[in-house]
Amino acid sequence: APRRAADSGAGEPDQRIDDVIPHLRSLFLAGRPVIGVCAAAILIRAISAHTRSKHSDAPVLALSDDGKIIVPLLGGHHGANRLAEAIATETGGVAAITTAGDRAFGIALDEPPAGFVLADPDSAKAVMAGLLEGRKAVLSDDLPDHLAETAKEWRDWLSPIAASSDDRDDALRLHLSLRPAEGALADCVFHPRRVCLGLGASRHCPVDEMHDLVRRGLDQADIALAAIEGVYSVDLKADERAILAMADAAGHRLHLFTPDQLEAETPRLHEPSEVVMREVGCHGVAEASALAAAGPDGVVLLPKIRDAHATMALALKPDGAGPSQSSRHNGRVMLVGIGPGQHDWRTPEATAMIASADELVGYGFYIDLLGGLSHGKPRRDFALGEEEARCRYALEQAALGRDMAIICSGDAGIYAMGALVYELLARDEAEAGVSQAARRVEVMTAPGVSALQAAAARSGAILGHDFCTISLSDLLTPWDQIEQRIEAAGLGDFVIAFYNPVSRRRRVGMAKAKAILLNHRPADTPVVLATSLGRPEEEIRHRNLGDLDIDEIDMMTVVMVGASTSRRIAHAGGEAVFTPRGYAKHLDSPAQSAEHQSDTNEETPL
């Protein structure tokens, strides 16, 4: 197919992918639509183990190489059917849509137009079954006059199933309302997302208090949570946990206004506050935020109400209205551990963060390890030694409302950028920290497979008992401190994973570590040298501590030194290293084993 596309003048592909199946999985897990010019079975085998729900699975489509047949395989009501129809229009092909509602009526009840939401997605199944049996639908709404065009858009969408005036006796009831679905006598209830929720809080407001206040306010205004169009506040509250939690519960990102923007709404406030003006720089936060989002013609549905530490207000965004002020969402720094490099070792959470990022930041080699997942993404590469610059850049860009992904090999919290990000956040700007706006950004971390885990997995079970990690880099830690830690680990008989064992200029540290450990454990202690883990050039070598040659070690190697109890055995034509945890006393004495079995855990539950 690529060759045929090139011959037709379409040119070469933007990018060639070597490991196609892992790449497809990464795209699917990140929520990105997948269109395969291939047999449907290839796509099915690639992602079948990773499907979750028809309401969340990304669209997956198979396309014949001539573009004549387009088959939505997954996510039919999550965009795949519409995408298939769009492709068919371009190619002159046929969208092989198999979902019954789309085939019969050209609509899917659980995929309403943008700006509408089905209150109970499960209700669509029974209603569609009735429609397929020949029943019609009666459409009703109780929207205010401000939303007449919204009601018309909804009715036009459902016109293929609407009952005529002569065919209403056995009709199904579909209703559009801002009110909670529980009070509606209808088979399906839809909500237009036209209500703006404004929030304010004093510092460290309890999360439960904010949730209770919003619940009470929605009940008072008789508004469904699903009718909320967005959650808004002042930018000084970008890091307020209660507000962030409420936005998350409502299914929205928090959007922010500056105090000056909110001050412009003061003439429309029911109760301007001088106290808030002194504290924040505007005469109101919750009500002003709701009105700013609803636009100049916005209608207050619920003036500000308060609790001990929280405030909220609701405003209706009329038809055709845009916000009177431009908001930005709260920025995020996502610390993404991608593992040593192998696609299958990257977590779905990490993949999703990478896909959602506005920009990728990191050491260029680490971003390159993402392969096709980074294609088309803005990226900012930093050299080794520019760790502070990359973290500072990501934080300050997030302060502007951007989602920044800092790409780290292994785990972001283990000898990577996680600690440095928090160190910058802990400092005032005058103390070489970051700006106040940057200190309010949200920080999220996706754990990754670390090099010591990968090395242990490739070589057996060397981490079967107590272990520690030590970095031999003295760029940030004085050598005398490193030496103390090696001595302590030797005395404690820990398995040790040595990170940064050597560099081009630094070769003696590993030799000194070897000498120290030989004072505490035998020369035949197993050592594993794991190089370029998870990459095509991966190499695992088994050595003994006594004859370890430092010249075998490079910057891409993690050195695993066993404890005095660690053992190496021949297994499956190779070698494996493990560190016994103490089961031998039970294995050697079956009677004792039964007696103490209840006291022995396979692993420590967390």
Image (cartoon, helix red, strand yellow):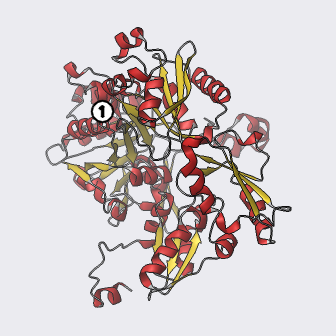
Q: Is residue 240 left or right of residue 395?
A: right
Q: Residue at x 34, y 47 (%)?
A: 408
Q: What is the quadrant of residue 368 in the picture?
A: bottom left
Task: Please count the marks in the image.
Answer: 1
Read off the residue under disc 1.
420
Residue type highlighted by circle 1 = Leu
Q: Residue at x 43, y 14 (%)?
A: 272
Residue 429 location in percent, x, y? 23, 22
In the image, 594 versus 259, the foreground residue is 259
| Viewer can see residue 55 | no
| Viewer can see residue 108 | yes
* Element type where label 1 sits in the image: helix
Label 1 neighbour load within 10 Å: few <14, some 14-19, many 20+: some
Q: Say if 425 sits above or below 590 in the image.
A: above
Residue 388 location in percent, x, y? 22, 36
Q: Quadrant of the N terminus?
A: bottom left
Q: Quadrant of the C terminus?
A: top right
Q: Residue furthest front?
A: 165
Q: What is the quadrant of residue 498 in the picture?
A: top left
Q: Say if 299 sits above or below 40 in the image.
A: above
Q: Residue at x 30, y 77 (%)?
A: 13
Q: What is the quadrant of residue 174 in the picture?
A: bottom right
Q: Residue furthest left?
A: 505
Q: Is residue 138 left or right of residue 287?
A: right
Q: Residue furthest right?
A: 169
Q: Is residue 361 left or right of residue 169?
A: left
Q: Say if 276 sits above or below 515 in the image.
A: above
Residue 75 location in percent, x, y? 58, 65
Residue 526 location in percent, x, y? 42, 49
